[in-house]
Amino acid sequence: MTLGPFHTLRVQLALLVVAALTGAQLISLWLFADERSLAVRAALGFEAAGRSANVARLIEEAPEELRMSILRAANSPLVRFDLAKEPIVQHTDHSDGGLVEGRIRALLDDGYSRDIRVELHEIEGQILPLPHLSQEMAEMHMAMMRGELSAVEMNLSIAIAGGQWLNVGTRFERPPIQWPVYSMLTFALSAAVILVVVFWFLMTRLTGPLRRLVGAADRLGRGEDIADLPMVGPTEVRDLTSTFNRMQDRLTRFVADRTRLLAALGHDLRSPLTAMRVRAEMVDDDETRDSLVASVEEMQSMVEATLTFARGLAGSEEPENVDIGEFLEALKSDMMTPFDLEVGPSVEARFRPHALRRALRNVIENADRYGGATRVSHRGRTDEFIITVDDDGPGIPAPELERVFDPFFRLEQSRSLETGGHGLGLSIARTIIRAHGGDISLSNRDEGGLRATIAIPFAND
């Protein structure tokens, strides 16, 4: 099954890293905005507190007739000062935790003798600019703040010698976050390009060896000879590659040893069988001699079939890219056994043509021998191609559909080689097909007859 590019490990890891970094940047931006707001408010509040402390010191040290002049000079559109007998802050519960009061006391060199009252509160809802601004400055202020005003109002009451209070009123807005769109866009694009390039390179070092490993495993399953894979990539990938190379060596040695054992066994049986044949010819009784000779000939024929089977297992034919339709047309023209070939779609696959021709020949000859008229067709699927062989025979009992692939198993019980063969044809066919990474199965058709279905996967290059 073919999946889209977003299902690959390389793309998924790159997207995951980019998404994680994007989320981290957004969280950092949100935290930065909150810290920025707190810093701006604290700076503006401390600036107003410092001015209030200085004005209070001047009023206490200046003559009575200069106090109003000091207040007029200290007033500004941002901060208003007033000298009165009553404080505008009636409570002593500081909503700022005492930070502003502490700053004022530090500037006045005052301990805890002076009464200093602080009131801070948020202004909710739509607010106007600072009340003491001119119309022109208010409009300019609104344009600068982009209409996004979120204000904090601070009122101070500082006790002055002589029983008076210095009342201070100020309001400071939290300036909106400035979003430099062009700068942020260029930063995001450049960061994304750098991240993608870096992680694409890193993922290539990881996925490259994995893709080679996938291809090698597929070719090994199809019976192809492959060289040891190079040890590249991260440590885990190197370990995986090393394990695959060892597995391949073990499987190759195991199959080679079994094949050599089978071939040696069949070869070594030739000599005693030949000796038995000679001794059987020396028997005087005609009936006994003919029976012994027939048995020896049958054994010799089975040995030759075993050697043929072993040679098929040990074949070293290189795979080729072949068009299935043309391949079946050539098979039909070469075989003595007739069969009908249905025209199918153009499908190209990679396999060992001589080995697969031998497997199909065994299946088709088997169908013709027991089922009469034989029909062959082919088609392609997403990841494999299918060849079906149908006949019009009696079929096979369900319990025997799998047993007929066992070596030397025959449904025909006459023991005649002319009618039953050796029972190796389907075994050889299945061995060859499975060496291609595929399989063959038998099923009885509803309309009568037997169907052999051969499925071989496409090479995963």
Image (spheres, grey):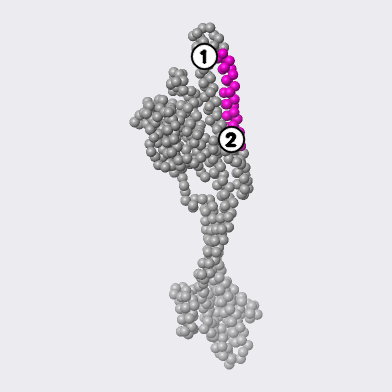
Q: Secondary structure at mark 1?
A: helix
| Residue 384 colored in magenta in the image | no
Taking 329 as reference, is 96 left or right?
right
Please indicate, yes or no, whether residue 116 appears anywhere in the rendered image. no
Circle nearer the N terminus (1, 2): 2
Asked which secondary structure carries label 2, the reply is helix
Magenta region: which residues? 249-278
Question: Dot 2, crowdedness within 10 Å: few (<14), some or many (≥20)?
Answer: few
Which three-letter amino acid code belongs to the residue tagged 2?
Leu
Q: Is residue 122 above or below residue 378?
A: below
Nearer the viewer's eye, disc 1 or disc 2?
1
Residue 272, magenta (yes or no): yes
Q: Quadrant of residue 387?
A: top left
Crowd tier of the residue under label 1, counting other residues whose Cα lies within 10 Å: few below 14, some 14–19, many 20 or above: some
Figure label count: 2
Residue 115 point in image, percent of width and height: 59, 79
- Image coordinates for residue 317, horizontal then vertical, percent: 54, 35
- Residue 365 or 72: which is nearer the viewer? 365
Going 50% across and 69% down the picture, which residue do you hit?
Answer: 181
What type is the residue that disc 1 sits on? Val
Mark 1–mark 2 distance (CA, rounded to whole Å):
41 Å
- Residue at which label 1 appears: 293
Residue visible at 49% across and 52% down in the picture: 5
Q: Which residue is mark 2?
A: 251
Q: Position of residue 149 (x, y in %)?
A: 48, 75
Q: Is residue 249 visible?
A: yes
